[in-house]
């Protein structure tokens, strides 16, 4: 294979991983729900209705109630 083909494949794999991480960190809180954000088991904050994006490296847990 030529060098540019390998480069395109590597870039495509990196983009696929980045998109998968972004999609997995988007949380939607329903109209009748509240999202409770816990960080290492301790309460951090409450999210209201809407779309929220988590920071990938902070590892909080979201519980809808």
Image: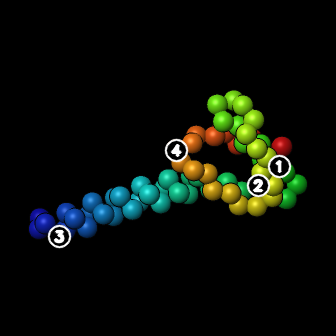
> In the image, which disc is placed on residue 57?
4
* Location of residue 31 in the rendering, given as x and y in whole percent from the top left corner: 85, 59
* Location of residue 35 in the rendering, given as x and y in whole percent from the top left corner: 78, 47
Q: Is residue 20 above or below residue 8?
A: above
At 56% from the left and 57% from the top, the residue drawn is 23
Q: Are marks 2 and 1 in contact (CB under 8 Å)?
A: yes
Image quadrant where residue 63 sits: top right
Q: Is residue 57 above or below residue 18?
A: above
Task: Choose mark 2 or mark 4, whichever is in front.
Answer: 4
SS under mark 3: helix
Mark 1 and mark 4 lie on one chain; the one further toward the N terminus is 1
At 81% from the left and 58% from the top, the residue drawn is 49
Q: CA distance from mark 1 to mark 4?
A: 23 Å
Q: Which residue is mark 3?
A: 4
Give the crowd class for mark 2: few <14, some 14-19, many >=20 residues within 10 Å. some
Q: Name the quadrant of the C terminus.
A: top right
Give the crowd class for mark 1: few <14, some 14-19, many >=20 residues within 10 Å. some
Which residue is at the far right?
A: 32
Q: Inspect this view and state whether residue 18 appears.
A: yes
> In the image, which disc is placed on residue 11?
none
Q: Which residue is mark 1?
A: 34
Q: Which residue is mark 2?
A: 29
Mark 2 and mark 1 lie on one chain; the one further toward the N terminus is 2
Q: CA distance from mark 2 to mark 3?
A: 43 Å
């Amino acid at each position: 294979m030529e060098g540019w083909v390998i480069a395109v494949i590597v870039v495509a794999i990196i983009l696929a991983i980045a998109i998968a991480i972004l999609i997995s960190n988007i949380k939607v809180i329903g109209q009748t729900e509240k999202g409770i954000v816990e960080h290492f088991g301790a309460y951090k904050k409450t999210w209201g209705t809407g779309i929220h994006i988590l920071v990938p490296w902070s590892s909080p847990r979201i519980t809808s109630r």
